[in-house]
Amino acid sequence: MIGVLVSGEGSNLQALLDAGLPVSAVASNRPGVPALERAETAGVPSEAFLLGEFADRVQRDTTMANWLQERGVRLVVCAGYMHLLTPPFLDRFPKRIVNVHPSLLPEFPGVRAIDEALAAGVVTTGVTVHLVDDGLDTGTVIRQEPVPVAPAETLVERIHAVEHRLLPEVVKELCVR
Ligand code: GRF
């Protein structure tokens, strides 16, 4: 069973759902985001775990890990999830947490990866699916696919299209392990 962590739009969550992958729980760090609506529409249990409602990040992550494990989750996918995960969460799912990132890591980690690639004037950027550790987009790379920057006007759209194909492919492979 797969647990998906989200913070916003949830288009990558939708790609996983559309691929027929066994998503059993969706957790968000923000309330009322479109990703939670997508979960609800798909009939998948969802919950928002807001930092402000817990003593600290560790408490929040521990509660979230419990909630996911109670729903049979054995593989966690960060799909646009905007918080770093603390060691108590990481330790619950060793080598079983993946993230999708819109650059060829280690180039352009962080939240502004596409803008930074454009500003840097690189010819090629891309998409990375990687294991999550306690750093910012620093875990072992599982799969990467290059995307040409030009034409810049359509870069965001083309990167998302690659994410929506690559992430379900990699997750499918991890599910059979
Ligand atoms: C994606 O570009 C993903 O690579 C990045 O955040 C974006 C999330 O989009 N980490 P969505 O919420 O899946 O639509």
Image: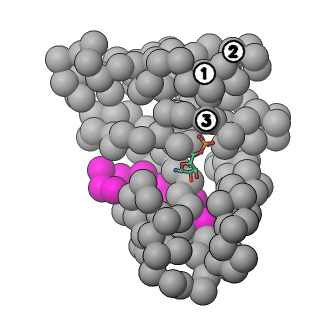
Residue 50 drawn above or below residue 6: above
In this rendered view, identify the residue nearer to me: 119 or 103: 119
- Name the amino acid, label 3: Glu
Element under label 1? helix
Q: Position of residue 107 (x, y in %)?
A: 44, 75
Residue found 34% across the figure and 56% down from its top: 136
What numbered label is drawn on residue 54?
Answer: none
Describe residue 33's horizontal placement relative to residue 61 as left or right.
right
Q: Position of residue 155 (x, y in %)?
A: 67, 67
Is disc 1 in contact with disc 2, using a CB cutoff of under 8 Å?
yes
Provide the residue span drawn in magenta: 127-136
Is disc 2 in contact with disc 3, using a CB cutoff of under 8 Å?
no
Could you tell me how far apart the alpha carbons at marks 2 and 3 are, in whole angstroms? 14 Å
Residue 7 drawn above or below residue 142: above
Closer mark to the observer between disc 3 and disc 1 = 3
Element under label 2? helix
Element under label 3? loop
In this rendered view, identify the residue nearer to me: 85 or 104: 104
Is disc 3 in contact with disc 1, using a CB cutoff of under 8 Å?
no
Q: Would you identify the image quadrant in which residue 1 lies?
A: top right
What numbered label is drawn on residue 9?
Answer: 3
- Name the amino acid, label 2: Glu
In this rendered view, identify the residue nearer to me: 68 or 36: 36
Crowd class of label 1 (few under 14; some 14 to 19; many from 20; radius 10 Å): many
**Can you identify the residue that label 1 sits on?**
36
Residue found 45% across the figure and 81% down from its top: 120
In this rendered view, identify the residue nearer to me: 147 or 69: 147
What numbered label is drawn on residue 40?
Answer: 2
Q: Position of residue 64 (x, y in %)?
A: 40, 22
Label 3 CB-ligand 1 distance < 8 A: yes
Q: Earlier in the sequence, mark 3 or mark 1?
A: 3
Is residue 155 in the magenta section?
no
